[in-house]
């Protein structure tokens, strides 16, 4: 479910909301805002409460978006690409990890 609100300039802003059916009704969590979780007995009511919680939460501040140059990040995954390309023992390491994982999975399923 995506909830639609309007920002200060009248622009429409859409927020994803996770709805879950519970024993007592419904729970709604606004994705990205873990403090915006509400419960209600009906689907329509939980959506209404989620909207109110989100409006209350974002009215306390200002949501902004910023861009960060990936080259300015201190460590990125790019730094690790190919780091073991010349390591002669890497294939052995991967095989040992696979064996360990298979043994660990087998232990979990054993009675």
Image (cartoon, rainbow, N blue to C red):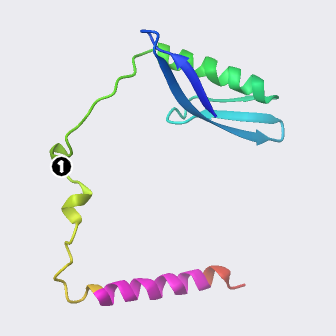
**Residue at point 16%, 43% (across, down):** 72
Residue 47 appears left or right of 77:
right
- Residue 98 magenta: yes
**Residue at point 44%, 84% (across, down):** 98
Numbered marks: total:
1
In x, y percent, where is residue 42?
81, 28
Q: Is residue 58 above or below residue 29?
A: above
Quarter of the image where the N terminus is located? top right
Q: Which residues are magenta?
A: 91-106
Looking at the picture, tell me which residue is in the foreground, 21 or 103. Answer: 21
The residue indicated by pointer 1 is 74
Residue 97 appears left or right of 36:
left
In x, y percent, where is residue 59?
48, 13
Tell me the chief SS of the magenta region: helix
Q: Quadrant of residue 49?
A: top right
Residue at the farthest front position: 11
In x, y percent, where is residue 55?
55, 16
Q: Is residue 5 above or below residue 72?
A: above
- Residue 77 magenta: no
Residue 52 appears left or right of 33:
right
Looking at the picture, tell me which residue is in the foreground, 39 or 64. Answer: 64
**Residue at point 76%, 23% (across, down):** 45
Quarter of the image where the C terminus is located? bottom right
Q: Quadrant of residue 68?
A: top left
Residue 16 appears left or right of 45:
left
Label 1 crowd (10 A; few <14 / some 14-19 / many >=20): few
**Residue at point 46%, 10% (across, down):** 10
- Secondary structure at badge 1 equals loop
Residue at the farthest top position: 9
């Amino acid at each position: 479910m995506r909830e639609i609100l309007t920002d200060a300039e009248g622009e429409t802003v859409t927020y994803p909301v996770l709805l879950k059916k519970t024993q007592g009704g419904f729970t709604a969590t606004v994705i990205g805002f873990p403090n915006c979780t509400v419960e209600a007995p009906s689907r329509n009511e939980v959506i209404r409460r989620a909207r109110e919680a989100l409006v209350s939460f974002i009215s306390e501040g200002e949501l902004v978006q910023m861009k960060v140059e990936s080259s300015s990040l201190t460590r990125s995954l790019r730094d690790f690409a190919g780091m073991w390309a010349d390591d002669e023992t890497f294939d052995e390491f991967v095989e040992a990890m696979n064996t360990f994982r298979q043994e660990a999975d087998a232990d979990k399923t054993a009675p």
